[in-house]
Amino acid sequence: MKHYKIAVLAGDGIGPEITREALKVLKLIEERNDVSFELMPAAFGACAYFETGDAFPQATIDICDQADAILKGPIGLSHEESKKIPIDKQPERGALLPMRRRYNTYANFRPVSLPKALAHFSPLKAEIIGEGIDLVIVRELVGGLYFGQKESGVNEQGLRYVRETLEYDELQIRRIMHQAFKLASKRRKLLHNIHKSNVLKSSVLWNEVMEEVAVEYPDVTVVNMLVDSAATALCLNPTQFDVMVMENMFGDILSDQGGGILGSLGLMPSACIGDDKAYYEPSHGSAPDIAGKNIANPYSMIGSVAMMLENSFNMPEEAKNVWAAMQAVFSDGYSTADLSKPGSGVIMISTEQFGDKVVEKL
Amino acid sequence: MKHYKIAVLAGDGIGPEITREALKVLKLIEERNDVSFELMPAAFGACAYFETGDAFPQATIDICDQADAILKGPIGLSHEESKKIPIDKQPERGALLPMRRRYNTYANFRPVSLPKALAHFSPLKAEIIGEGIDLVIVRELVGGLYFGQKESGVNEQGLRYVRETLEYDELQIRRIMHQAFKLASKRRKLLHNIHKSNVLKSSVLWNEVMEEVAVEYPDVTVVNMLVDSAATALCLNPTQFDVMVMENMFGDILSDQGGGILGSLGLMPSACIGDDKAYYEPSHGSAPDIAGKNIANPYSMIGSVAMMLENSFNMPEEAKNVWAAMQAVFSDGYSTADLSKPGSGVIMISTEQFGDKVVEKL
Ligand SMILES: CC(C)[C@H](C(=O)O)[C@@H](O)C(=O)O
Ligand SMILES: CC(C)[C@H](C(=O)O)[C@@H](O)C(=O)O
């Protein structure tokens, strides 16, 4: 029997309630397979800061170090609440970015997927969605502005200023390109390379390295697209895309636009993969405004479990089953509040009911 | 009689043909008002580079220096064609950015506007558009990554790298904030401040200065929103926005997303305003693939003329008339190819016909 240790970081806001549903799914998978999951819960995010003074406390680091995979809920507070925490201790700078850096999870996979049958969830017209949206954003996750040096102070003219650096070297670019090309090879063999080479020199290097790597994947067609054009295209014609690769900040913005075209960030799971460790997280925030109300959408968290099953535990069949189970719940006409606007004909269910229904379908 | 000098930079690709239509409108305005426009055409962009070796040649600089306002078409080449020009001479780095820097046009206004009656142009469902989209993106245009220092080379590990800087000082932030707050005061008194303060230190300063400036505009309500959330929200609920203010790169991406939700970048005019000089330009590219075919949408160029009339020549009534004339052409059921997809019931007309119809309506 296989045995896996999973660090479970429920996070802030809606984190605990959507994590609870994801764990139900994990439990079922465990029961019916020759596998055992050892869940190791740990504090992470603002909740950890208020408990321990640290958003990524040493105890949590130790647990994550030992884990075979990390399942992480969303973290963060409202804009106003955030101000109660010193800037460098805030959950993003104090926990999330350190985690990404520590485990060097440079490859962030964010599927943006909406079958035709669920076109009604989307703000886009049915004819735009056509046969369905099914693309993956491959985002570089440990470089660029996120991790560049930052300097602030008062300049010679007596003005407060901040200077931050966006840095990439060829190695950082090459390894994410390989991930993107490999994924493209397994899918429609179409890779959109998103850049801003008409302004950013880093994009010039990015494109150079992309062309070098492309030689190794002759069956993949590359389309170069400026990031601003991509933002237009994701609204006008999202079905043209299959795999899109881009640097960190561009990926942050375009993947949330991805949630926008699907109809809810609640539909955005993700996998963050390094050479030795991977963690899985919804790509949305902690939604403090709806926390504790049992109305959040656990799809992104359950989907993150599916990505973990496939990537970390080599259980692609069960991963597929999880996706199918969630689609089946939707097909039966149910969804959480984010996707069941009045008049849409969708029957609104709670966070917990969604989790239960997924388990039933499984 | 008022006399204004206008530098006319038709630019590349579809630039000349959409400029031609915009000039028709300008001519009519001149005929029926106590004003004369002296048009000073000049070469700018890739065309200028191929003619003179410089995308922003000295002769053009001289003309722009003298002009009361500058009307500028889109510039640029296809990804492949661009490679024929040395990187620093390419139209963006060699002409557009130098122009922005020279005239310090720090405030870029990009209206994203779609009346309810034109909801069929948009990829968004009618219920998302509701009573219509009507927002303005106020983009900082001469700071940030666009103008920061850039360094590239080979590092100690023998790896090629690029490092660029994103820099803002409080003065740069304060002046764009005043522009945004002033605009908000004249409109719905609602300002969305777009930032990424959970990662970028520059956003922390940005928000600090915003709060200082806000004190002077007590009647304006500020909503702080992360740039990634804004990308979601622009798809899910664009009508919540009225004025949005953001730094340079964020503005680049979100404004093109704005074109996406309208249905075409052809609907995106813009004004770039400095303390002493302003220029007006479509916010889309030069679309080399459709250049010379008489099918491009001149709306963005004619709209840029309307913005020039209002901002540079103090002719708000005529500006309004121009907007109304374009809406009237749409209401009659006509549009260029970008907005008249088969089955949409829209009658497709050429670039030239669109210009003529606008003149008729005026
Ligand atoms: C919380 C924040 C730091 C994070 C990011 O910007 O990467 C989030 O938006 C995401 O996309 O995972
Ligand atoms: C052409 C390019 C340099 C420019 C920019 O990035 O600012 C354009 O995309 C725009 O939005 O005006």
Image (cartoon, coloured by chain):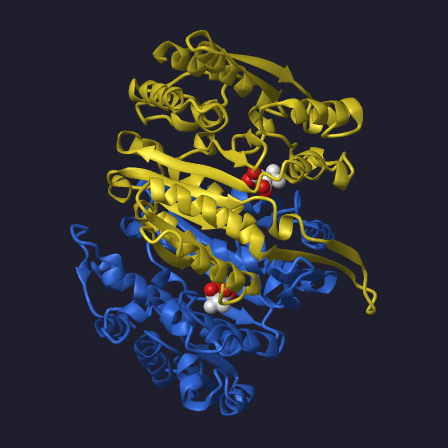
Chain colours: A blue, B yellow
| In the displayed structure image, the side of residue B127 where residue B272 appears, left or right | right
On screen, B277 above or below A293? above
Q: Is residue A74 visible?
A: no
Q: Quadrant of ligand 2?
A: top right
Q: Is residue B215 visible?
A: yes
| Residue nearest the viewer, comparing A357 with B59 | B59
- At a point 34% along the width and 58% down the height, the residue shown is A264
Residue B316, position as x, y percentages in the image: 39, 25
* Quarter of the rendering occupied by the C terminus of chain B: top left
Residue B300, position as x, y percentages in the image: 47, 27
| Residue nearest the viewer, comparing B19 with B118 | B19
On screen, A338 above or below A14? above
On screen, B46 above or below A317? above
On screen, B257 above or below A291? above
Residue B264, position as x, y percentages in the image: 44, 33
| In the displayed structure image, the side of residue A25 where residue B1 appears, left or right | right
- At a point 57% along the width and 78% down the height, the residue shown is A277
| In the displayed structure image, the side of residue A300 where residue B109 appears, left or right | right
Residue A139 location, quadrant: bottom right
Residue B336, position as x, y percentages in the image: 43, 21
Q: How many marks?
A: 0
| In the displayed structure image, the side of residue A45 where residue B202 appears, left or right | right
| Residue nearest the viewer, comparing A338 with A188 | A338
- At a point 51% along the width and 74% down the height, the residue shown is A87
